Image (tube, rainbow, N blue to C red):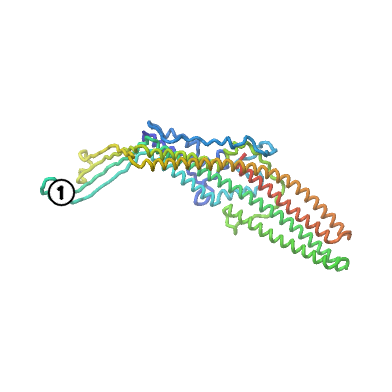
Amino acid sequence: MTSSNGAAAALKSVKHAAPHAKPPCLPSPPLPPLPPLKAPPLPSYIMLTHASRLCHVPVLLLGLAACTVGPDYKKPDTTDITPATWRWQASAPRDAAPKGDWWKVFHDSELDRLEALALADNQNLRAAFSRIQQARANARAAATDWLPNLGINSRNKRERTSAHLPTPVPVNIPSAQINTFSETLDLSYELDLWGKVRRTFESARAQAESSAADFNNVLLTLTGDVAATYFQVRALDADLASLRRTIALREKSLGLIQQRFNAGTIQETDVARSKTEVATAKAELADIKRQRQEASDNLSLLCGVPATHFTLAERPLRGSPPVIPAGLPANVLERRPDVAAAERIVAARNADIGVATAAYFPAISLTGQGGFLSKDTSSLFTTDSRVWSIGPSVSLPVTGFALIRANVRKKREAREEAIASYRQAVLSALKDVESTLAQTRYRAEQSAAQNEALAAASQAADLTRARYDSGATGYLEFLDAERTRLQTERQANQVTAQRFIATVRLVKAMGGGW
């Protein structure tokens, strides 16, 4: 059986495995400092759910001389669905960029500030951390089952007996009043001969580790959403700059056209068309402002800041995103928190089979009591008032084996379901990386072509303006060239934003590192 010393060591190891650090910089309720994402994807400050600490179960089993029923856990094999390399590969070699705060590869101080806000104040992240704490508490509670239950009972009563109690031989027994005082220490301890307690702890531990991986998934999703929304805002800033520049040019053109109309060299329809173009550009500007405000409000929600207090200065998005090396598929699977969470659920379901199987075997408990019993308080704590009792109890199922068998079958099918979900998570992770690698490649090609188109459209617009100013072409041709330039420029802005967002998605698909 499991010794009480081993059980105490088990509880102590669990208690000290997950320090609850209070961050100095966050408001109440406290949330520990959020670590950078890295492999393995379990937060370093959640030591209870850290596999390297909790896997030392033998320490918890010192003195166990019996068997542990149920299957021992083996990680599901996914080599049949995991490729050796990706279809698409980044051209850049493995670099020395930071892998923890991955968004810093963009070298954008404003993005760094927003990510810090989100990590400190996002409420979904706080909720995810609370779920970790709940899972940790469940694991600690499961660890206490190795310890005996001790309790102090103090019983004090005064009772009156009946004068008409039934007796085998008719006899008159006078009624009496009796005082009873007792102070005892009660003990009960279930021997874990079949490993039920061990399997219960294994299940709780695996679920705590799964909750930690879920937290990392929320963390990764949050930081990715902040970056993607930020680049969306910056793309709209580029559109605002393009439209303001276009409005200024069109208003200038309207003034020149008005002068030429006053001089009688052009028709009034040219003036009307020019006014239409100015008004249309202003309407588009107002719509882009609306879109930017909506995106900015979404960003404030991610950062945990009231929208009324959130401001973000305009700054058009320029340049190209960094190239992210993909690494090997097997390494990516180790970093993906959703894959880690699914794998830990498989481990929990596997342990549940052992818990259910233990119901086939007898439950053996040891109970004892020791203390003092007396009719008055003056003699309660004397040698002659000492009492004690100790003995085992055995509970063996006689019927109900069909129910136990059905429950074991249910737990086995739950494990098979978890294995299928785990393999699906692996396939989804591989698909995400392949898709985002393709996106980054094709977005780069699209951006290069779009920039060539913008250069050509700008040249055509400049040449057409010169021809129109010299009277060599009509206003409609000039207007069409200006429209093409604006449309091409805005498309280039969006493609640039999509390149940055595709890079963010690639980092997320790879589990937040490379």
Residue 510 position, x and y percent, is: 61, 41
Number of numbered discs = 1
Q: Nearer the viewer, residue 256 or 415?
A: 415
Decide if residue 133 is on the left or right side of residue 278: left
Using the rendered image of the protein, determine whether residue 449 is visible from the camera's viewpoint.
yes
Q: Is residue 127 left or right of residue 226?
A: left
Q: Residue furthest front?
A: 402
Q: Amino acid at mark 1?
A: Pro
Q: Is residue 279 left or right of residue 75?
A: right
- Is residue 262 placed above or below 488 in the rendered structure? below
Q: Quadrant of residue 254?
A: bottom right
Q: Quadrant of the N terminus?
A: top left
Q: Is residue 48 visible?
A: no
| Crowding near the residue tagged with mark 1, few <14, some 14–19, many ≥20 C-alpha atoms within 10 Å | few
To which residue does mark 1 refer?
Answer: 166
Which quadrant of the figure contains the C terminus? Answer: top right
Q: Residue at x 81, y 50 (%)?
A: 456
Q: Position of residue 145 (x, y in %)?
A: 38, 40
Position in image of residue 191 (x %, y %): 35, 36
Q: Please, what secondary structure does the residue beneath circle 1 have?
A: loop
Q: Position of residue 78 (x, y in %)?
A: 56, 36
Between 73 and 298, the residue placed more toward the observer is 73
In-image side of 465 versus 491 (left or right) = right
